[in-house]
Image: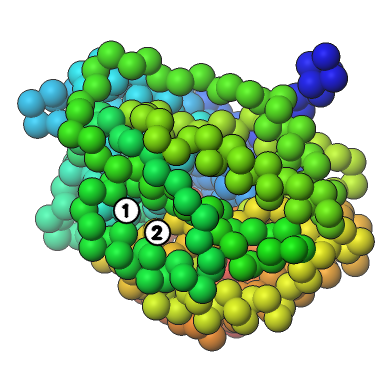
Amino acid sequence: MILWNIPIEKRKYGLSQSNLVTDYTGLLPERVERVMEATNRSDLQDIIKEANEKGYKISLAGLQHSQGGHTYYKDGVVLDMRSLDKILEIDEKNKTIRVEAGASWEEVQQAITPYGLALKVTQSQSIFTIGGSLSVNAHGRDIRFGPMAGTVKEMTLLTPTGEIITVTRDDSKEWMKYVFGGYGLFGIILDVTLELTENEVYAIQTEEVKTKEYEDYFKRLMDDDKTAMHYARVSVAPETFLEEMYVINYDITGEIDKDTPLKKEEGIRISKFALDIGRKGGKLEDLFWETQGHYIDSLDGSTITRNNVMRSESTFMEYTTPGRVEVLQEFFVPVNSYEEYLQDLKKLLSSNDSKEDFKVHNITVRYAAKDEVTTLNYATEDMLGLVILIQHGLKKDEIEGAKKIIQDWTDLTLKHRGTYYLPYYRYQTKEQFKESYPAWEEFYREKSQRDPNEVFQNLFYDYYLKEGSTS
C-alpha cells in the first residue's frame, strides 16, 4: 500500500498563453509575444513571410524536452508544431515512412509496428517529436546505423525566406547539414521520409564489468555483429564509484515480429521509489546501485522487440522538489579514451555527495558513431556518450557552484578530445562551446546567408552564436 501512495509528479513547463514560457528545467523563463499553433503549411508560409517583412522573430517548439532555451526567444513568436502530426505514407516494400515533424515517435511506432517495421535510430524513449529529435540530431541505443540524421532520405523544408522546398541527401545546397542538429535555426521541418528496418526480436544479455575493462569489452562487442543495440550504466555509488558497470546487450535472434504490442509504462511507483532512495546519496546510493543490478540481472535471457527497446519508461523520473532542479548533461569521448577519462573523472567528482548540493544520480553510456552529416557535430569520431543526471539547488550560489563543476568537467572532456551535447542548460562557457564545436563559424555564416533577416531565433543562438560571433 505504501507504494500506491507515492505521488507521480509532473513538472510544470512549456507553452503558456500567459506568454511566460520555459522548457524542461525551468531555469530560463522568458516572456514571448505570443504562441501560435502550426495548423497548415500555407499559414506557416504566410507567417514566415510576414516575419521577414515586419521583423519579428520565430522559435519552434515541439514537446520541449530541451533544456537550454532552444524553443523560444524574448518577445518572439513561438510556433507550436505539435498539430503537424500526420503519418503521410508507409512504404512497406522499401521500408520507409513519410511523417510530419510534429508527430511523436510514439505515433510513428504505432503506425509501423503492424507491418513488422521499426525505427533505425531514435532515443531510448518515444516521448519526443520527430522535428525536435532531428533538430538536436539525437542518438540512442543502436550501435549499427550511425546518427539519426543519416536515416533521413528526404525532407520538406519551409526555409527562412518562406519557400517550401524538397531536400534530398544529394542536395547541392546541403540543407540537411544545417537543419539537422541546427536547433530550429534554419527553417521549419514540415515532413521527413525516414528509413526503417525490421522489427527484430532480441535476446537480452546482461553482465557486470569493471570500468577499466569496458573499453576492450566494447571493442569486442562492435566486432561481433550479433549485437544490434547496447547501453551501459556506471556506478555513482560511494563503494563502487566509477569502478563498476552494468551492460545491457540486445542480441539478434533472427526473428521478425508483427504481433507483439507496444509496451506501456510499467512499475512506475516502484521505479520512482528506488530512484528517490538513490537521490539521497551516500549509503542509499549504494542500495540503489545494488537494486539496479538485481533488476538488470532479471532481464538476462528475456526477449524484446526492437520497437519496445526504443520506448523506455520516463514518468518515474519526474522531479519537482521545491528549491531544487534535476538536469541532464552529456559528454562524448573517443572510445579509446574512455578508461583514462573515467580515472581522471574520479579525481574531479566526490564519490559521496550525500552532504553536497551538487549530486550525480546516474551515468548511462551509449555509443555515438562518427557523424559526417551535420555541422554542429558532437561525434567527430566514434565516441562513447555519457548521459549524466544531475541535481542541484536553485539559489544563486548553488547554480554557480554547479556551473563551476560542469565547466571543469567540460575542460576534462576537452582534454580527452571529447565534446559535450548542446540541447541542455548553458553551463558551459562560450569559449568551451567554440572549442567543442570548431565549425560554429561556418554554422553562423550559413545562418546569416540563409536567414538574412534572422527570422528564426532562440535563446541558445543568442547566447552562444550571435554573441559569440562578435566576442
Which of 35 and 337 lies nearest the eye of the viewer? 337
Using a 10 Å C-alpha cutoff, classify the residue at mark 1 as few (fewer than 14 neighbours), some (14 to 19) or many (20 or more).
many
Instruction: Check residue 143 in the rendering and tell me which mark sits there, or answer none.
Output: 1
Amino acid type, label 2: Tyr
Which corner quadrant of the image does residue 274 belong to?
A: top right
Query: In the orientation shown, which residue stands out farthest toward the bottom?
Result: 415
* Residue 258, percent from left and from top: 24, 17
Residue 463 appears in the rendering: no
Residue picked out by circle 2: 367
Which of 98 and 202 lies nearest the eye of the viewer? 202
Q: Residue at x 68, y 76 (%)?
A: 346
- Asked whether disc 1 touches disc 2, contact meaning CB atoms under 8 Å apart, the reply is yes
Which corner quadrant of the image does residue 438 belong to?
A: bottom left
Q: Is residue 333 above or below residue 307?
A: below
Q: Is residue 215 left or right of residue 288?
A: left
Circle 2 sits in a helix, a strand or a loop, which is it? strand
Which corner quadrant of the image does residue 47 belong to?
A: top left
Amino acid type, label 1: Ile
* Cα distance between the residues tagged 1 and 2: 6 Å
Q: Is residue 66 above or below residue 385?
A: above
Residue 334 appears in the rendering: yes
Q: Is residue 69 left or right of residue 332?
A: right
Which of 374 and 300 lies nearest the eye of the viewer? 300
Q: Is residue 197 above or below residue 370?
A: above
Q: Is residue 186 left or right of residue 421?
A: left
Circle 1 sits in a helix, a strand or a loop, which is it? loop
